[in-house]
Image (tube, rainbow, N blue to C red):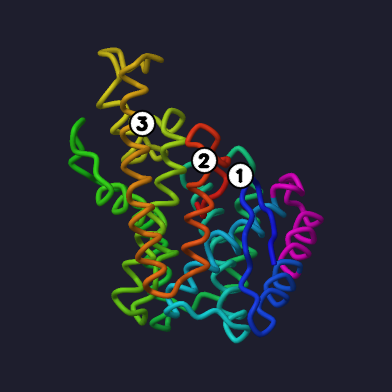
Amino acid sequence: MQIKVGNIEYNLPDEAGMAAAILKLINTEEQRVLTIRKCGVKAEEYILIHLVRMYILRWVLPVIEIEHSGCLDVSLIPEIQNRFWLCMFGRSVDDLHDRDSAFFSVSDSILLTAIYSSLLNFQPSTAEGKDLLKRTAKSLSPWQDELTAASLTMELIGQDLCHRVAYFLSSPSVGDRAAKLVQSYIGVLLGRCDLDDCLADGATGLQSTAISRSLHQSVADPEGKIHLNSQLLEWYLSTEKMIRQEADFLMINLEKFGANYAASVVKDTFRQSPFNWMPAINHPR
């Protein structure tokens, strides 16, 4: 069964009623965001619906599949729902932190943070609650790297991204191999979004990323201006090639691990031309 979100068609796993269960969960969460919108959130309806579908299909399902060694069945629906709530919580907290959202006002982000933190029912007195709160705080702390014009690597991109979405990473109970694959998945898919956003993200400030800092260190003139010239194109193509090569390795590793749905998402994402990417809304932050 397929469902299209943005420019990507997602092939839902359809064993033992899983596709129907996913669609039911999507409908439940769509109805929730529409109800939330009636309570004062002013974001456009189509944005809220897109976020539900995108987070569940592009981020939560692949990550849960990886963490369960390629298994996706109806027993995991509560875990999938909880991880989706965490995406919405993290997104709204991040919007409050760096104020870079074109889709949500500050009041929207405050309301969404309150609603999804309530659904998650964080308990600082428990090990799980304490861990999630600590990782959320980590995601909002400054990331320091020793980046130079010639030192951008996938490892550095991944470290930067995993720091910024630390709340979404695997819990300590997940096996090391699966946790590393989740980090690679985040690095590849969010790295692609960061490359798309790098001009807007800038060289400094809360919005900057390893990729945007590399862009400015590599091609900006002494006044900090980016010129549309061959040097910019060469940097862009080189960085895009590095991310695409990592995506190829990731697809192979995911398939070997049995995470076929996650592998298909990576494949379908990178099948598109690098000059015709999906909007940068396709990320959990």
Who is closer to the viewer here, 247 or 113? 247
Q: Quadrant of residue 252?
A: bottom left
Residue 34 sits inside the magenta stretch: yes
Q: Position of residue 209 (x, y in %)?
A: 36, 40
User: What kind of element bears circle 2?
Assistant: loop
Asked if disc 2 and disc 1 are in contact, CB closer than 8 Å, the reply is yes
| Residue under numbered circle 2 | 99
Residue drawn 62% across and 79% down? 77
Residue 39 location, x and y as percent? 78, 57
- Whichever of labels 2 and 1 marks the residue nearer the N terminus, that label is 2
- Give the residue at x 43% y 75%: 258
Callout 1: SS = helix
Q: What residue did someone put label 1 on?
A: 106
Tell me how far mark 2 sits from mark 1, CA to CA: 8 Å
Q: Where are the magenta residues, as a range?
A: 28-47
Residue 237 marker: 3
Amino acid bearing label 2 = Arg
Element type at marker 3? Answer: helix
